[in-house]
Amino acid sequence: MASDPDAIEAERLRVLRSFDILDTDPEQAFDDVMQLAARICEAPVGMVSLAVGDRQWFQARDGVDVSQLGGAGWFCDYAMAQPGVTQVADAERDERFAGDARLAGTSAFRFYAGAPLVDDQGLALGVLCVLDSRARPGGLNETQLMTLDVLARQVMALLERRRALRERRRSDEAATAAVEAARLVTEKLAESDARFQAIADSMPQMVWSSRPDGHHDYYNARWYAFTGAAEGTTLGDAWGEMIHPEDQERARTAWRASLSTGEPYEVEYRLLHHTGSYAWTLSRAMPIRNAAGAVTRWFGTGTDIAEMKRLEQAKALLSQELSHRIKNIFAVISALLALSARQYPEAKAFARAARTRISALARAHEFVRPHTESSRPSLDGTTLHAFLCDLFLPYDDDAGVPRVVVSGDDADFDDQAATPVALLFHELATNAAKYGALSAPEGRVMLSTRRQGDRYVMRWRERGGPAVRGIPDAAGFGSSLLALSVEGQLGGALEQTWAREGLEVVADIPATALAPRRAAGTFM
Amino acid sequence: MTARILIIEDEALVAMELRFVLEDLGYEVVGTAPDARTARALASRGGVELALVDIHLTDGATGVGLGQELGEDFGVTVLYMTANPGMVRHGIPGTMGVLTKPTDEGCVRSAVEYALHLRRGEPAPVVPDGLQMFG
């Protein structure tokens, strides 16, 4: 224990405070002990006095009015510093107090006997004492001394018990608070769980959740209602069995991919309906991450898209049917022209030219109409280059090698651009076949297309044909069609150069002109 | 070279024009059928060497099965003539190939000649433009 008086004082205060007793009301247990001590010692006054800083505070007292005394040097200060019982037989004759002016006025007390209250660490905290207004030269007898000593320890035991009770009360309070807090948390969880359940169950969508390892641990009521599965039977990995056998592998692969990458999951599959048939559903899931970014849970939804699929299919069917009819009309018009021309032999050349133009238009529209896998005209897709290669097929040489070579940047084109694009290249090719490079067996045409910023430049160069002798005298209807297509419909510039080695045509159009619908952000 | 040809096409004008083209080329057109039933009736009379078969007929997309039937049961050489070649892209047993519509006289002439050469086991030139052969 510290020997520094200040440190001792501080420690004493700390210990006293731990009893939670300072400046409290009298208590029966302390009063009983104190009164027993006074009775046995045949003294009119008894006290349990505690040394609180620079004062003596009387926790229990009998026969005295003051509840505390300030300052040092009182009987108790002496008694506290001594082991065993300290006695002052007659204060007036005792050299320790004889000169103390403070006692002069309180000569009511001439006899004092006190036993220190010492805790288990050996620290004196106060005194159990008895006082008498008479001097008692003989002091206390053996029994009285022993009683005072024993009762002092009893006071100490009461103090210790008080501390133990207080600590237990505190830990009880803490335990109660913890229990209450836990109860509140549970209540809140239950409440939020109930709220989640209520929301999840009232949704028109199927809702599920999964652990980060992919183990499904929750499905809402809608899922069970839709699939007809018994509650709990699709937990874990069993969900796969609810999916159409043809879609299972695709769904599982997508799910595994999302689990390993943390990317959102989205897949369409046929889900077993409680009626026993399969219905198209869209299944999606998002990962929930903790503060460290790790996935803690997946929340997923399943949406019945059977109706949407039916509408989609109906729409696709309708638009295919429509474009099939449009194509038929091209064929009918073409046949009508041919049949009409039969009566007028002089119109045969005219009819042939008109029919090839109509045919080019039909081909172009075939490329831009909505397609299914089986209606697609070319396996190479429906881009501009695919269309051009198809359009120039009739000009291939005997070995099947293209004589119009298409190169450069490919592009998408839509139905609005189909007519001018088809007419432009149909006219160029038929002209080349009549007068230009394609009229000679060795002749070739290089058609290069280039995306230059927001422009799309198509360059047609003829080589190997008969030498060009300047600008043709009269621009025919074909030339008018070229200008009309490029400048009128595509909003571009057309430049024709009749170089000696072959015709060169440059059509410089806005890149957006090929697919104006897409550029405007609207789709059919 | 002459031959007996059956036209199966639901658009009467297209069928008529095709008939004139083939007759101008010297072929005998045994008939034009707008549906599978009529086509079967015409083929069952016998003697048809080549059939030009559209896929979409007045009774639906019956051309695919009809072509196979004509080829396998009636011994007719079958060329599909369709705007939807994708429907027979992977080939149909008993048939020879597909000609994509719209087409022109030149293509029809060379495709018909080519098919007849093959039918008769004669040496045939290169496959003409616009004709896609199966197998």
Image (cartoon, rainbow, N blue to C red):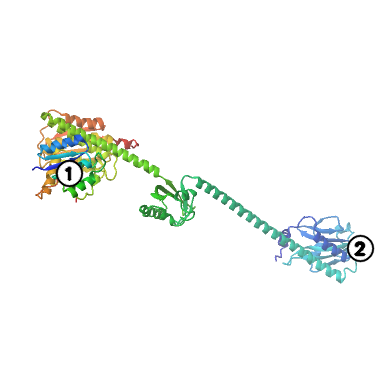
Q: Residues within 10 Å of mark 2 (few under 14, many from 20)?
A: some
**Residue A519 vs residue A147, the one in the foreground:** A519
SS at mark 2 in the image: loop
Amino acid at the residue labelled 2: Arg
Residue ID for mark 1:
B43
**Residue A360 vs residue A138, the one in the foreground:** A360
Q: Residues within 10 Å of mark 1 (few under 14, many from 20)?
A: many
Is residue A494 found left or right of A521 in the rendered image? Answer: left
- Disc 2 is attached to a residue of which chain? A
**Looking at the image, which residue sits at the far bottom?**
A142
Residue A499 higher or lower than A5, as above or below: above
Q: Is residue A83 visible?
A: yes
Is residue A357 found left or right of A247 in the rendered image? Answer: left
Amino acid at the residue labelled 1: Ala
Q: Quadrant of the N terminus of chain A?
A: bottom right
Is residue B124 found left or right of A522 in the rendered image? Answer: left
Q: Quadrant of the C terminus of chain A?
A: top left
Q: Residue at x 54, y 47 (%)?
A: A195
Q: Residue at x 54, y 50 (%)?
A: A193
Is residue A130 found left or right of A424 in the rendered image? Answer: right
Q: Residue at x 32, y 36 (%)?
A: A517
**Residue A410 vs residue B74, the one in the foreground:** B74
Give the alpha-carbon distance from disc 1 to disc 2, as whole Å.
Answer: 153 Å
Location of residue A17 in the rendering, given as x and y in whole percent from the top left corner: 72, 58
Q: In the rendered image, which quarter is residue A79 located in?
A: bottom right
